[in-house]
Image (spheres, rainbow, N blue to C red):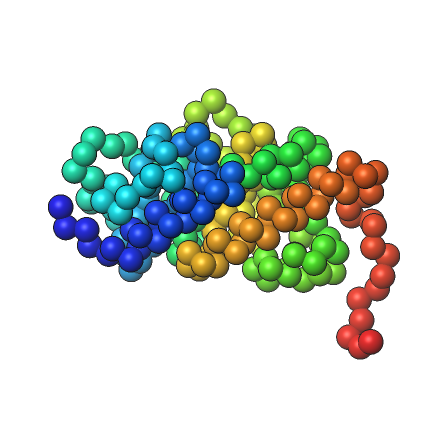
Amino acid sequence: MTLGQPSVRERICELCRLFYNFGWASGTGGGIALREGNTLYMAPSGVEKERLQPQDIFELDLDGSITQAPDKPAKLTACAPLFMAAFTHRNAGAVLHSHSLNVVLATALVAPGEPLRLTRLEMMKGLEGVGYFDSHEIPVIDNTALEHQLAGRMEEAVLAWPHANAVIVRNHGVYIWGRDASHAKTQAECLDWLCEAMVRMHAAGIDHLTHDTSQPTDSL
């Protein structure tokens, strides 16, 4: 089999190993999809992400149809229809699915039907288009028994929250995207930090939305 874009395939494997070491892709969980030109590259389903090899990656067209599959028996990631929402509606260059425990714990602090709300936490500045004094909201959708059943809820959230570049799944994890692999990776790291800060502040009895009463200023 011709590997096509080895750098893209190798980048997916590198990110999968990194996410495994973070604890975001253990037990075959998590997923990563990258776009180069008119080709989407996605990892297979139900495999140990830290052992993934470039030849294991699927190629798809922009409609989500498989154009090249691995030589050995493999199944496309169950995240594929959820990845497509960000590729289609946000022109994403990379979409990452993390099982970050910090994100999962943060969903326990969000009321049903409400978004995750963030303000006045430094790592917010690492999120696309977000500042320290902003009130930033990220949609939280309810989980389903099977991953692909989330596709409709994912697409609705992507369309309804145009200023967020992530959709969080309650008690599950997060789908987060960026213009390329490096951008999406840093977005995922910032959100993980923010959720950990939110959970730790809650445990300490601190309201993460009202803890800082300073006023924005343009000068010292």
Taking the image as shown, residue 43 lies to the left or right of residue 121, namely: left
The answer to whether one can see residue 18 in this image is yes
Instruction: Tell me where residue 114 appears, x and y as whole percent.
Output: 67, 37
**Looking at this view, is 194 or 118 the one in front?**
194
Q: Image quadrant of residue 201?
A: top right
Count how many numbered circles sit on residues in the image.
Answer: 0
The structure residue drawn at horizontal position 35% and vertical position 30%, both measured from the top left corner, is 46
Taking the image as shown, residue 201 lies to the left or right of residue 104, namely: right
Taking the image as shown, residue 60 lies to the left or right of residue 98, namely: left
In this view, the residue farthest toward the right is 213
**Looking at this view, is 207 or 20 the one in front?**
20
In this view, the residue farthest toward the left is 1
The correct choice, above or below, for 27 with respect to 95 in the image is above
The structure residue drawn at horizontal position 13% and vertical position 46%, both measured from the top left corner, is 1
In this view, the residue farthest toward the top is 145
Instruction: Tell me where residue 189 appears, x and y as whole percent.
Output: 56, 51
The answer to whether one can see residue 140 in this image is no
Instruction: Tell me where residue 157 appears, x and y as whole percent.
Output: 53, 42
The structure residue drawn at horizontal position 48% and vertical position 59%, both measured from the top left corner, is 183
Instruction: Tell me where residue 211 appears, x and y as whole percent.
Output: 83, 50
- Give the quarter of the figure containing the C terminus: bottom right
The structure residue drawn at horizontal position 46% and vertical position 37%, both measured from the top left corner, is 25
